[in-house]
Amino acid sequence: MKVEFYGHVRQYKNIQAEIDANMREVLLSGNYVQGPMLKRFEGELAAYHGTKFAVGLANGTDAIWLALMALGIGKGDEVITNANTFFATAEAIWIADATAVLIDCDPVTKCIDPAKIEAAITPKTKAIIPVHLYGQCADMAAIKKIADKHKLKVIEDNAQAIGASGKGFKIGELSDVATTSFIIQKNLGTFGDSGALVMNNADIDARVRVLRNHGSTARNVHSFGFNSRLDDLHAGVLSAKLKHIDAWNDNRRKWAARYTAGFTSPKNFTLPTELPGYRHVFHLYVIETKKAEQRDQLVDFLVKNGVDAKTHYSIAIHKQAGYPWGKDARINGSVAHAEHNAATCVSLPMFPELMAEEVDYVIAKVKEWDQAQA
């Protein structure tokens, strides 16, 4: 059996009529950039999150970077985030000309560890960027408490967790702004790349709208800005898909539960954890091998047996060739948990359109590998 990692084509076929209708509407309108379809999708996205505003952008990296700019964060300022995330989180901090401060993750959730934040705060610290890793929310209640105490801004990197929630909070509720990515492999993905911000602050909304469009407030009038616009064709795809996101996330949760139930008493790997009261949307279903040298062995075994397993963020930020990319950065305290996560993580196939027999085949092959280990 062959089990793909992504189900992009299956998903398109399932709602092809809805997507095609929106794309046709855009094509026939002649309004392809900052047109009515984008405006419609931004309204739908804000309503979905329960926020007042949403701004569509070219990609998720720009979303973080422009959020930092809109908050006035730049050269000489420090921004705290976790070391075990996609490189773009730190990259956006550097693009904004700020200093990335990397701290450890929680050993259970793999999200930023709130207990490590205060020790990393200096007079230069201006913001915290918690990453909702793999589809589970970071502990935003604890993070907001720290941010309020030290008068810091909070930007949620929500590229992986649209539709997730925490115990008593929703994404965007306990931060200044939440960012997201719509690249095709995300839970809500378009046929290419794009991103967005959601927020309740009218000033941030207004600033980002100017920044994304060459600093323009009116035709032929420009201050300072960039070109980071979500075009209407992508907005049409996303508008069609947004209506299904909760059902798709329910499917992801169903397959995650099937994986977990199937992996009884694993000897050589550990399973992901969903915190009580949280809604994990399993952008990725990530297991960790007990030893780093086992990780590649497991991936190779699965691939040879038709399972398209992958690794995600398998090199911690501070060990990347691009660190610190000619910019300022520092590591605060031990990041041993982040390094362990990077060295041992294995992502199993996870998408809403999986079939039970595919999940069961993956379970069987992982267990076969596990039982064969000395």
Image (cartoon, rainbow, N blue to C red):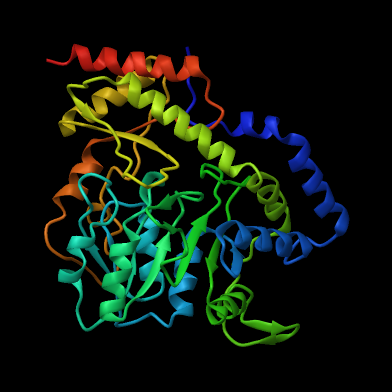
Residue drawn at x 69%, y 51% is 239
* Quarter occupied by residue 352: top right
Q: How many marks?
A: 0
Residue 306 seen in the current view: no
Q: Is residue 310 shown above or below 74?
A: above
Task: Residue lying at the far right in this picture: please name it.
Answer: 28
Q: Is residue 5 shown above or below 26?
A: above
Q: Locate residue 20, reporting x and y percent.
A: 78, 41
Q: Locate residue 230, reporting x and y percent.
A: 64, 61
Quick check: 245 left or right of 277?
A: right
Q: Nearer the viewer, residue 373 or 166?
A: 166
* Quarter occupied by residue 279: top left
Q: Locate residue 362, reporting x and y percent.
A: 39, 19
Residue 213 seen in the current view: yes
* Quarter occupied by residue 245: top right
Q: Locate residue 254, reporting x and y percent.
A: 47, 29
Quick check: 47 left or right of 303?
A: right
Residue drawn at x 20%, y 56% is 104
Q: Is residue 298 shown above or below 326?
A: above
Residue drawn at x 46%, y 59% is 171
Q: Is residue 260 shown above or below 117?
A: above
Residue drawn at x 62%, y 28% is 10
Where does the C terminus fall, quadrant-wise? top left
